[in-house]
Image (cartoon, rainbow, N blue to C red):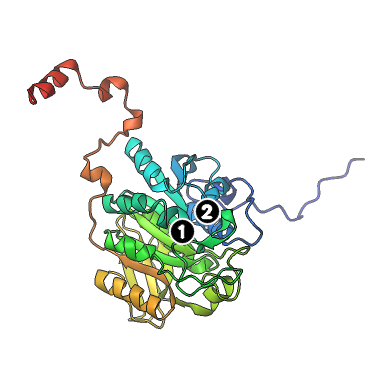
């Protein structure tokens, strides 16, 4: 006599899916080979969550990176997307070229403080100046971890290396530079602050042009000691959030429960909204001069301010609009539409005779 199937036993709960029907696992990548406890892995986890919650099609993403510990990150999320690991400091340049080839893709560049603020500084500034639609994440730990921990260009003056050497040089503030060059979405966060980092990344994904997210990400091997201003302990002891943040996609009904005067709403270019819940500071992130002054004040007082530092509510043309790109990506056009006919070339040449 066969036994009847058991009824009433708990069934395994299916994984949650986003609006595209994908579980979060679809957005994961290879297993990390970084040091255990590296802040970069925490950023990867928040990137995965932000892309999943933003309903980004994994096949419609291009990941770009340069060289360094940070640039390995692109291997650890979105196995199904496109990707290119370029040479040192060239993530911004290759992402710009890729965007011009196919502007329908969401471009995500992951760079480091050395990759961005040293050899790649010129590329970074020109990407911002051109307003290339890229989510540009800086994994900022203040050292060159891949070459055993020398100071990088973002190391704070007076901070020390593991062996006690003191940095005597002024740091480069990537957020201040980005604002100066016209970037309209500039944020800073801490790799361990999940509640803040995810909505900031989702806001960057929804932004129309260049979005720079500078994330202090402690190097647990070479820069996580007393005297480092980018260690886990320093970041936790000195972090001063400008605001708590929620992100509301544009297609969802907006329901907010808050006391009058405690929330500031920032509408992004696609209609999505960032809700800034003000804490101690009465800060307006749409004031460019105030943003730069605040960064200078924070540097002078050795404060580690996090949050949405600057957002321009006025939508400026991005690179594709400036260049009047066709709606159909260049990469998908057939040769006969890419090559001008002989008559057109002859007419063009005649203009120069």
**150 or 11, which is in the foreground?**
150
Instruction: Please identify the quarter of the rendering in which residue 207 is found.
Output: bottom left
User: Are there few (<14), some (14-19), or many (20+) residues within 10 Å of tag 1?
Assistant: many
Q: Outermost residue toward the top?
A: 342
- Mark seen at residue 113: 1
Q: In the rendering, at what x and y percent does residue 294 appear?
A: 33, 76
Q: In the rendering, at what x and y percent does residue 24 appear?
A: 57, 51
Q: How many marks?
A: 2
Secondary structure of the residue carrying tag 1 is helix
Secondary structure of the residue carrying tag 2 is helix
Q: Mark 2 highlights which residue?
A: 70
- Mark seen at residue 234: none
Q: In the rendering, at what x and y percent does residue 117 appear?
A: 41, 57
Residue name at image x 77 percent, y 55 percent: 9
Residue 104: tell me if it is visible.
no
First in sequence: mark 1 or mark 2? 2
10 relative position to 200: left or right:
right
Residue name at image x 61 percent, y 72 percent: 225
258 relative position to 12: left or right:
left
Residue 67: tell me if it is visible.
yes
Please, is residue 121 above or below residue 215 in the view?
A: above
2 relative position to 124: left or right:
right
**293 or 78, which is in the foreground?**
293
Say which of marks 1 and 2 sits in front: 1
**333 or 256, which is in the foreground?**
333
The span from disc 1 to disc 2 (Cα, nearest Å) is: 9 Å
Instruction: Please identify the quarter of the rendering in which residue 292 is found.
Output: bottom left
Please, is residue 238 above or below residue 154 in the view?
A: below
Please, is residue 268 above or below residue 260 in the view?
A: above
Q: In the rendering, at what x and y percent does residue 236 appear?
A: 54, 76
The reply to whether callout 1 and callout 2 are in contact (CB within 8 Å) is: yes
């Amino acid at each position: 006599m066969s036994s009847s199937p058991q009824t009433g036993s708990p069934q395994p709960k299916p994984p949650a899916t986003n609006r595209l029907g994908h579980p979060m696992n679809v957005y994961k990548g290879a297993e990390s080979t970084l040091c255990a406890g590296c802040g970069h892995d925490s950023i990867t986890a928040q990137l995965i969550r932000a892309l999943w919650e933003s309903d980004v099609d994994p096949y419609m993403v291009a990941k770009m990176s340069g060289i360094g510990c940070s640039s390995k990150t692109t291997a650890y999320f979105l196995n199904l997307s496109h990707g290119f690991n370029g040479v040192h400091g060239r993530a911004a340049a290759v992402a710009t070229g890729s965007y011009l080839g196919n502007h329908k893709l969401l471009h995500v560049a992951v760079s480091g403080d050395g990759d961005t603020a040293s050899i790649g500084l010129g590329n970074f500034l020109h990407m911002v100046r051109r307003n290339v639609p890229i989510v540009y994440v800086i994994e900022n730990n203040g050292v060159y971890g891949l070459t055993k921990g020398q100071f990088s260009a973002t190391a704070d003056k007076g901070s020390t290396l593991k062996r006690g050497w003191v940095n005597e040089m002024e740091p480069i503030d990537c957020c201040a530079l980005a604002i100066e060059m016209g970037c309209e979405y500039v944020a800073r966060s801490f790799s361990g602050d999940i509640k803040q980092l995810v909505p900031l990344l989702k806001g960057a994904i929804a932004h129309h042009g260049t979005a720079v997210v500078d994330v202090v990400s402690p190097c647990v091997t070479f820069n996580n000691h007393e005297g480092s201003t980018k260690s886990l302990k320093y970041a936790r002891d000195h972090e001063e959030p400008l605001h708590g943040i929620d992100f509301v996609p544009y297609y969802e009904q907006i329901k907010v429960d808050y006391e009058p005067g405690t929330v500031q709403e920032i509408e992004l270019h696609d209609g999505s909204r960032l809700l800034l819940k003000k804490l101690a500071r009465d800060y307006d992130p749409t004031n460019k001069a105030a943003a730069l002054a605040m960064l200078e004040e924070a540097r002078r007082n050795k404060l580690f301010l996090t949050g949405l530092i600057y957002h321009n509510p006025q939508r400026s043309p991005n690179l594709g609009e400036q260049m009047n790109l066709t709606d159909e990506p260049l990469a998908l056009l057939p040769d006969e539409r890419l090559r001008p006919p002989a008559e057109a070339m002859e007419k063009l040449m005649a203009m120069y005779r």
